[in-house]
Image (cartoon, grey):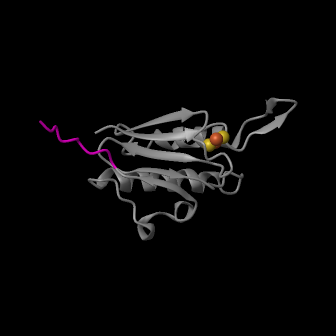
Amino acid sequence: MVHKLFVCTTCASIWKDGKRVGTSGGQLLLDELLKLNQSWSLSSNFLIQSVECMSACNRPCVVAIAAEGKYTYLFGDLPVDAASLATTASAILVCASKYATQSDGSLPWSERPAPLKKGIVAKIPPMQELAVIG
Ligand code: FES
């Protein structure tokens, strides 16, 4: 099964005169995740994909985990300052690993790593096959 980890690269941007200045926090998070992904045992099960926005802009940084037939989770408030970036990225991959092992992707609060215990923005139920009537 293919799982997806979406990372907003617009989150935590600094803007000046309508232009982004420097590297956004979301881009730093994506870069760190891609670095860790090189030695992650589930790297072949997950596609890590950058997105420009997931409409949780007031809760930076934001990532989402999704797969067909599983809950979709949207996490925000993920810290990416220099002291937290590696811990946050690592916690995301721990959470994604847990997600991959659950048939419906359930991620109970008590089983999520600290940076993902709070700041959850959405938990969307899996799509179910629709019964054909008639
Ligand atoms: S800018 Fe990241 S969710 Fe909108």
> Which quadrant would residue 133 be assigned to in this image?
top left
In magenta segment, residue 133: yes
Q: Residue at x 33, y 37 (%)?
A: 2
Let me know if residue 28 appears in the view: no
Q: Residue at x 33, y 50 (%)?
A: 100
* Whole-percent x, y for residue 32 in the image: 58, 43
Label tally: 0
Asked if one can make out residue 99 in the rendered structure from this viewpoint, the answer is yes
Spot occupied by residue 120 in the image (x, y as percentages of width and height): 53, 58
Relative to 61, is 110 on the left or the right? Answer: left
Residue 68: x %, y % from top left: 31, 41
Report whether 11 appears left or right of 19: left
Residue at horizontal 59%, vertical 53%? 76
| Front-lying residue, 28 or 12 | 12
Residue in the foreground of this view, choosing between 56 and 130 = 130
Which residue is depicted at the point 67% across and 42% down? 11
> Ligand 1, what quadrant?
top right
Q: Give the side of residue 91 with respect to residue 1, left or right.
A: right
Quadrant housing residue 39: top left
Report the side of 46 relative to 22 (left or right).
left
Image quarter where the C terminus lies is top left
Q: Is residue 2 magenta?
A: no
Answer above or below: position of 104 versus 16. below
Q: Which residues are magenta?
A: 126-134
State the residue lying farthest toward the right.
17
Q: Main secondary structure of the magenta part?
A: loop
111 vs 71, nearest the viewer: 71
Residue at the bottom extreme?
A: 110
- The outermost residue toward the left is 134
